[in-house]
Amino acid sequence: MSKKPVIVFEGIEGSGKTHHLNKISRYLRRRKISFIKIREPGGSLNSEKIRKLILNKKSNFNRNTDLLLYLASRSENMDLLRKYYKKRIILIDRFIDSTISYQHYGMGVNLNLINIINKHMLSNFKVSFTFLNIVNHKNMVKRLKLRKFTNRYDNFKKNFYDKVQKGFIRLSNNNRKNYLIINSNLDIRLNEKLVLKKLNELIK
């Protein structure tokens, strides 16, 4: 594995993925280790414009339009990602697994369509490791209520999030050596130590 890995933080809403990504970002800055950090949807200027459109509570796209908007956001980020691929550590808040879990397992979009477009866009760009954060519905709802702002994807029914999280777990089971499942229902300080320990293994 490259010592400048591509590390992705995945999970449903309220699972703690962004918290852990931000903790790792601060840790790398303290150690003066160069890295870039992006989120999906979002990241580049144009991707952030698409993000606002996708997550707006007033938006009401059909599932195929939703997919294509997410992939358009990713497309806008690929030049940046390729520029730093294997040159800097790359941290990504959601990536390919989110597209498959939400759009295929959650919404029923054709998996072959997702895979074909992703393969075309990514080419030889590969994820090195994924932290998959899982959470039960009770804790997810509790955490969402603490947010000052919510978006369209924070307001689906329980059944949808259940399908998405099962999709994430299924993807992780297909490639266990490159995943670490973080049980976000446990003590957050314990999980922070687990994530940091694995990060140091990846970049040492």
Image: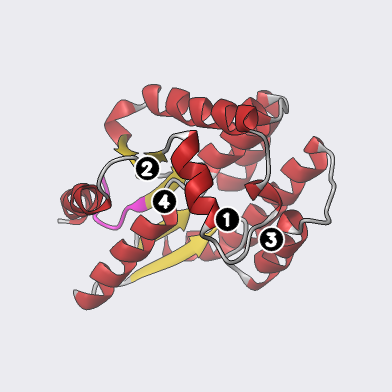
Please tell me which of labels 2 and 4 falls first in the chain. Answer: 4
**Disc 3 from disc 4: Cα separation:** 18 Å
Query: Would residue 19 be counted in the magenta stretch?
Result: no
Please tell me whether mark 1 sits on a helix, a strand or a loop: loop
Mark 4 residue element: helix
Identify which residue, 160 or 86, lies in the foreground. Answer: 160
The residue indicated by pointer 4 is 17
Q: Quadrant of residue 52?
A: bottom right
Question: Is the residue marked by circle 1 packed among few (<14), some (14-19), or many (20+) residues within 10 Å?
Answer: many
| Residue that carries the numbered disc 1 in the rendered image | 40
Residue corresponding to mark 3: 51
Categorize mark 3 by other alpha carbons within 10 Å: few (<14), some (14-19), many (20+): some
Relative to 4, is 164 above or below?
A: above
Q: Which residue is mark 2?
A: 130
Residue 187 position (above or below residue 34):
above
Mark whose residue sits in front, 4 or 1: 4
